[in-house]
Amino acid sequence: MHCTSNSEHLCKGNGLTVFTNPCNQSLCLALQGHEEIVWAVEVHGSRLFSASADKTIRVWDIESRRCEHVLEDHTRPVLSLAISGNRLYSGSYDFTIKVWDLTTLTRVKTLTGHTDAVRALSVADGRLFSGSYDGTVRVWDENSLQCLEILKGHTGPVRTLVHAGGCMFSGSYDKSVRVWDVQTLECKASLTGHTGAVRALVASPEYVFSGSDDTTIKVWDVHTLKCVKTLEGHEDNVRVLAVGDNAMFSGSWDKTIRVWDLRTLECVKVLEGHTEAVLALAVGEGGPTQGSKVLVSGSYDTTVRFWDLSTYRCLRKCDGHFDAVRVLAAHNGYIFSGSYDGTIGVW
């Protein structure tokens, strides 16, 4: 791993590639072990969980940077992860969801019923929601691990889920977003208007944002479920969304990141620098001043970029991955980047 910065030192050892910057004591290294694409990363306490196309989930100790365990039970690529209480849920192309005990790191149960890949997982009010390429969302009771309901209505694969305002929002390749009451499991609305697949959903206290292949982001009022604005400006598919304290960020196939003010819903900045599609975004600690935050972006160009949230200046461009950076997670001052090359960067 290599970060462009003022002072650099690159070393290798113990199977890890390590970069240290003496000026700010930053540390960049690669966790190696997966044999194929890393599709998802989640942090819980002192552990990082990574899901891969190699059919496994690896459990990493963040402090020692060592792989503690490999969870092997899926028969096809693992696409999605969710953590709730003492359980890890994993969704796969094998159509199943595995339930893992976080203390013993053993499988508790396999949830079956979906007839295609399980692409999205989200937990709300003691219920696990699973979105699948079979066009349905299944709801599972976290205590009994029984399927409570099959939520039907989408006519295409379900790609993304987000919980907001007592509802679960599901985004689909059928160009719509459906809104499900978490308690009654009734469909409260079908949000239409996009002319391309919905690939990304995020929520702020007031709004749900949906990013689409039609190059736009629609803003939905959490309470009225009405579209209050369509955000335009990207020139290609919107692939990823993230929310900070005062802004929403959108990453696109057009290689840019747009910054949208949460109050005015206006674009206040276009962040340029990536040379290929922006696939991943995360907001984390590590700004230039104590306690300040950064926006982190991962791209098909194999780099991770850090942006100052006060000036929107690019603070660091980090190289080291040998293929696209697909997913990001931020936790306690660390940034974790999962790549098509099978490694996880720690920044």
Image: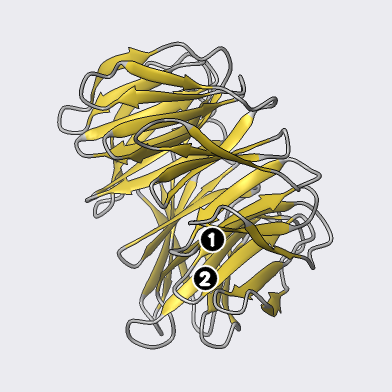
Relative horizontal placement of residue 104, taking residue 327 as reference (left or right): left
Q: Quarter of the image for the C terminus: give it.
A: bottom left
**Image position of 285 (left or right of 234):** left
**Of 9 and 190, which appears nearest the observer?**
190
Q: Is residue 180 left or right of residue 275?
A: left
> Marks 1 and 2: CB-CB under 8 Å?
yes
Which SS class for mark 2?
strand
Give the image location of residue 22, x and y in percent.
39, 80
Tell me residue 214's x, y (percent): 80, 50
Kind of residue at disc 1? Ala
Q: Is residue 39 left or right of residue 197?
A: left
Kindly indicate the quadrant of the structure image that contains residue 259. bottom right
SS at badge 1: strand
Q: Is residue 266 above or below residue 231?
A: below
Residue 242 badge: 1
Residue ID at (56%, 76%): 307
- On screen, 301 above or below 56? below
**Residue 80, image x, y percentages:** 47, 34
